[in-house]
Image (cartoon, grey):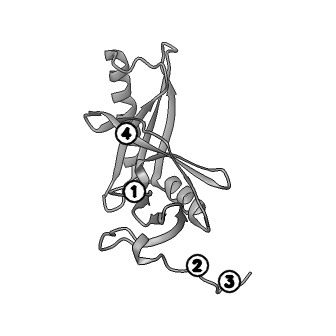
Amino acid sequence: MNFLRRRPSIPAALKPQLGPDERIVAWSPVADDQAVVATTHGLWLPGAAAALGWHEIHKAAWSGRELRITPAEVAEERDGYTVLVDGPIATVLLLSPGELPDQVRTRVTKSVAYTTHHVMPSGAGGVRVVGRRVTGQNGLSWAVRYDSGTPVSLPAVIELTDELVAAARNTMAAPE
């Protein structure tokens, strides 16, 4: 393998409209003259009007042929954090994956600065508290994702979630 060999540049017709400080880190062609493009800010999926920020991807899975992306969708805005749910899964067959799957995994993982899971005292479900880095933003973006079956609208669950997020924020704000 020649370490000096570079992957060809993305054809202009497949290149998404990038921001001024955004650059492409990996890409792969897919069917229908489209591409999946990973940038320093996020992931452009075929036909998307905008990139998914790395902090907006809940899960990314690579089968060796297909890349499966589960985006986060906002279910509710609360004071100081967002309640997220899984969005529709996007599956794309990568014709020439190259470094794209590794870049996606690395960048999604690096966006997570804090994560912890808590079981609800009643035993009815649980909640994951996550602090993520957002490109171009100082500090962390805080969100929670409830386990299936958790009574998310009960006042006691909301109150406990508020406390868990506040404790997590305090932990991350503590001097080292």
Compared with 102, 85 (above or below) is: above
Label at residue 7: 2
Q: Which residue is mark 4?
A: 73
Image coordinates for residue 90, horizontal then vertical, percent? 49, 46
Q: Which residue is mark 1?
A: 47
Cα distance in 3D space between marks 4 and 1? 18 Å
Of mark 3 and mark 4, the one earlier in the sequence is: 3
Front-lying residue, 112 or 175: 112
Report the Cα–Cα distance between label 2 and label 3. Answer: 11 Å
2 to the left or right of 121: right
Q: Quadrant of the C terminus?
A: bottom left
Q: Is residue 124 above or below residue 107?
A: above
Indicate the secondary structure of the residue bearing disc 1.
Answer: loop
Query: Is disc 3 placed on a helix, strand or loop?
Result: loop
Q: Is residue 6 left or right of residue 139?
A: right
Q: Amino acid at mark 1?
A: Gly
* Earlier-in-chain disc, 2 versus 1: 2
Single out the mark in the foreground, 3 or 1: 1
4 or 2: mark nearer the eye: 2
Q: Which mark is residue 3?
A: 3
Above or below, comparing residue 32 to residue 79 in the picture: below
Q: Mark 3 vs mark 1: which is more N-terminal? A: 3
**Disc nearest the viewer among 2 and 3:** 2
Residue 3 horizontal side relative to residue 23, left or right:
right
Tell me the residue at 40%/31% (across/down): 164
State the quadrant of the N terminus: bottom right
